Image (cartoon, rainbow, N blue to C red):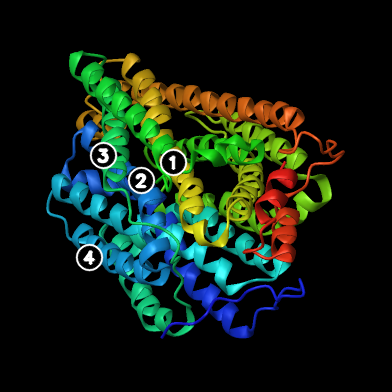
Amino acid sequence: MTQAPLRPTTDGTAVRAPRRAWFGLGVLLLPVLLVSMDVSVLFLTLPRLSADLHPSATEQLWILDVYGFFIAGLLITMGNLGDRVGRRNILLIGAAVFGIGSMLAAFAPSAAVLIAARALMGIGGATLLPSSLALITGLFADARQRATAIGVWTAFFAGGSAVGPIIGGLLLHHFWWGSVFLINVPVLVVLFALGPVLLPEQRSGQLGPLDLPSVGLSIAGILPVIYAIKHAAAEGVDAESLVVGLVGVVVLIAFVRRQKTLTEPLLDLSLFARPAFRVAIGSSLAGMMSLAALGYLTSVYLQSVTGRDPLVAALLGIPMAVAVFVCSMGGARVSRLLGARVTFVVALLAAAVGNLMVLGVGVDGGIGWYLAGSTVAGIGYGVAFTLVSEVAVASVPAERAGSAVGISETSFELGNALGLALLGSLAALVFRSGGDFAGTLGETLTTVGADSPVAAAAKESFVSGMHVALAAGAVIVALMAGLAWTSAGRARPADENEPDAADHVTADRVTAEVATAGVDAPDTEAVRDSRAR
């Protein structure tokens, strides 16, 4: 059943969404929660999984990272594909792929099979995120209702990443490690049952065919670069990492050049000409890098260094998860009070301060510092991530919503993957420099015994590596805050004859102006260009 998406009326007033639309939003939140949760659900699962499958240090990183890498590599493609073949169609197809990958991962007999299953989950997940957020534009024409819906969507996306370790810990307390994947299946069944009934089909009839060479170039560029980074961190810089990394960079350059020649590019580079969009994408990339490293390293710390049960470690993560969720819901309101520029800067600085507070933890204690620091960081991340989603939706015409959302969600997923690959590898390098340890911290403790002098030295080295990585994450986020402040200060209207505005309009106001003008009105693009600060 195809339903027409809601639109602003011809007299400029927006149509208030019926109750059915809010039920549809509830359905859209299901895949969002699963995709974001599966990014971090393995943080607490990894020690149990490692004891069963015996992955190498490199395989462990691939188990964690390959899911996010495939999502990041395919989000833009899947967002564009949804614009063409139908966003509800691509959502349901992706859910099926995600479910098959989840079942394969739950019963994986080896690390190699688990890596392949996680890659399949990443392919499915890449269809779910842009489709779900783009469908919101059809469900909610009223600007304030749409801003509220986006805030809820962002809260579930950001909160899912924070709650993933908690869900993992609860499941591990009662079941085997594969249960963290198998729990996805009943949720997807609900999506299949209600999605065709409550979600309107949306597609653009104005877009041409998908540029397949661009799809190939985007994937062939991202994956080699990430592989080179991971290989260099695990094995050291050698000819293989240099050659593979260089090939990836060359392919990405070719991808960017091709986009500049296309009438309908896979990646709309013109969006990056807008300071607000650049700041939003940079904030999500830097924020997710830091948040992923914080979640992963502290999960290992709580279990392997302090010896806490997975359930206890999960419960200790609740304050940060609550902070991310609640502040994601209230991010738009904060932005209306302070302005987008100030809100971005304050939120990012709060995240950086939170990371630095966690440096107070040590081998013998400091859980209070972890609880306080992770909560402060969660507040900052939650507020910042809401603004990213609002800017992405407000920046483009409705028919290109899927591709724009793909860019913003790519920055989230790529940031998560790079956080584990770069900051996680940085922590591993510091850890290995502290002694001749048998692989990871978990492998060392299993080999030498938890009470041996070597184990004590390994724990000290891990904590040192965690401190270095979290400090680096804080620096990255703080630099992004400075860039947000200076870029917004230099921003000029698109029309050089128009006087510069005294204030910086929030993404919520941009959305309201676009809705008032009508998404198909001739002057819609001018409204965005002159107001999106």
Tell me the tag on residue 416: 1
Alpha carbons under labels 4 and 1: distance apart: 23 Å
Mark 3 lies on a secondary structure that is helix
Badge 4 vs badge 2, beta-carbon distance below 8 Å: no
257 left or right of 474 in image: left
* Residue beneath disc 3: 62
- Up-down: is 93 above or below 190? above
Tell me the tag on residue 68: 2
| Of pointers 4 and 1, the one earlier in the residue sequence | 4
Q: Residue at x 37, y 57 (%)?
A: 208
Q: Residue at x 61, y 61 (%)?
A: 150
Q: Nearer the viewer, residue 319 or 135?
A: 135
Badge 4 vs badge 1, beta-carbon distance below 8 Å: no
Q: Amino acid at mark 1?
A: Asn
Circle 1: is it few (<14), some (14-19), or many (20+) Cα within 10 Å? many
Circle 3: is it few (<14), some (14-19), or many (20+) Cα within 10 Å? many
Circle 4: is it few (<14), some (14-19), or many (20+) Cα within 10 Å? some
Does the rendering let one see residue 37? Answer: no
Tell me the tag on residue 481: none
Badge 3 vs badge 2, beta-carbon distance below 8 Å: no
Mark 2 lies on a secondary structure that is helix
Badge 1 vs badge 2, beta-carbon distance below 8 Å: yes
Does the rendering let one see residue 362? Answer: yes
Q: Amino acid at mark 2?
A: Gly
Alpha carbons under labels 3 and 4: distance apart: 19 Å
